[in-house]
Image (tube, coloured by chain):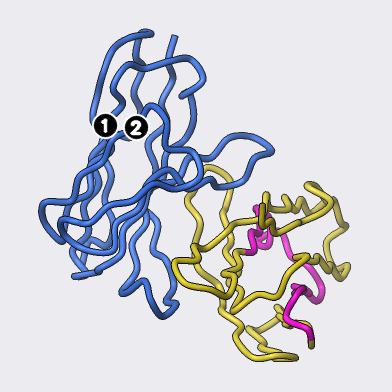
């Protein structure tokens, strides 16, 4: 199993550009989520999904969209990039949401918005 | 809002010293998880604690969940340079639709 994969690893955007961060998992996990990590702020939940076709907002959803058309994929879209979105983005998945299981994190995407 | 507190954010120890860090919540947690993130890496799950007063050990690491399920500790015996990284606790509060809330983490550096 590849686990959780994310592309790209690095990205530089100009303010106002849009892009999609890709996330995929091959473990047949129901639950997937996106976090951003900023210095001194820990991991903050952006959006999450408890299954295909179901998404919901986390702690910091503004400026981001998600969709979950398949169990495997959970892309994160930045609609109009802003310098405040410069961060490291992690996708995570776990077997289920209702009962706690460990979260598996992808390797991350380091995004810089100029 | 509900927060999981980890203070301080940084700690430096001499190799061979013991290290303890704490995770605190003002309200009762359903369970707590600990993760480790190596420099430049991604968080990796270490352990989950569910029961009041639960203690679990992984080699030199000892994890404890408080009796009131409002705090947790991670103790590392005789730190090694391989212990370097950021340790996060993540707690889930009781109640429907409660999501895992991460603390800000503590970054441990070890002087050889």
- Image height of A69 relative to A101, above or below: above
Magenta segment boundaries in residue numbering: B68-89
Residue B29 image-quadrant placement: bottom right
Q: Dot 2 corresponds to which residue? A: A64
Q: Where does label 1 land, which residue?
A: A77
Q: Chain of mark 1?
A: A
Dot 2: chain letter: A
Provide the secondary structure element on which disc 2 rests.
strand
Residue A31, quarter of the rendered image = bottom left
Q: Mark 2 and mark 1 in contact? Answer it, CB < 8 Å.
A: yes
Q: Position of residue B7 (x, y in %)?
A: 82, 53
User: In the rendered view of the protein, which quadrant contains the C terminus of chain B?
Assistant: bottom right
Q: Is residue B112 visible?
A: no
Q: Position of residue A67 (x, y in %)?
A: 20, 45
Residue at the far front: name it: B96
Residue A57 falls left or right of residue B64: left
What residue appears at the point 68 percent right and 62 percent down from the top-left corner?
B83
Task: For mark 1, give the secondary structure.
Answer: strand
Q: How many numbered circles are shown? A: 2
Chain painted in blue in the figure: A
Q: Which residue does the image show at 72% across and 50% down from the upper left?
A: B107
Question: Considering depth in this image, is B77 or B54 the residue closer to the camera?
Answer: B54
Mark 2 is surrounded, within 10 Å at the Cα level, by few (under 14), some (14 to 19) or many (20 or more) other residues, namely some
- Estimate how packed mark 1 is, as few (under 14), some (14 to 19) or many (20 or more) residues with alpha carbons within 10 Å: some
- Whether residue B80 is in magenta: the answer is yes
């Amino acid at each position: 199993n590849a686990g959780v994969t994310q592309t790209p690893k690095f990205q530089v955007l100009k303010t106002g550009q849009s892009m999609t961060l890709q996330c995929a998992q091959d473990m047949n996990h129901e639950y997937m989520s996106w976090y951003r990590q900023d210095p001194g702020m820990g991991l903050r939940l952006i959006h999450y999904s408890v299954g295909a076709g179901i998404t919901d907002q986390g702690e910091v959803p503004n400026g981001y969209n998600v969709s979950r058309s398949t169990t495997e994929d959970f892309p994160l879209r930045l609609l109009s990039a802003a310098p405040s979105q410069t961060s490291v983005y992690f996708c995570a998945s776990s077997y289920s949401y209702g009962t706690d299981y460990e979260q598996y994190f992808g390797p991350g995407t380091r995004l810089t918005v100029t | 809002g509900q927060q999981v507190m980890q203070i301080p954010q940084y700690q430096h120890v001499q190799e061979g010293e013991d290290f303890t860090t704490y995770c605190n919540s003002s309200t009762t947690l359903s369970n707590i998880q600990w993760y480790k993130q190596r420099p430049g890496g991604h968080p990796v799950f270490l352990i989950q604690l569910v029961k009041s007063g639960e203690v679990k050990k992984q080699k030199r690491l000892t994890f404890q969940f408080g009796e009131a399920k409002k705090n947790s500790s991670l103790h590392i015996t005789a730190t090694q340079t391989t212990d370097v990284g950021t340790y996060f606790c993540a707690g889930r509060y009781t109640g429907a639709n409660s999501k895992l809330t991460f603390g800000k983490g503590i970054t441990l550096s070890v002087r050889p």
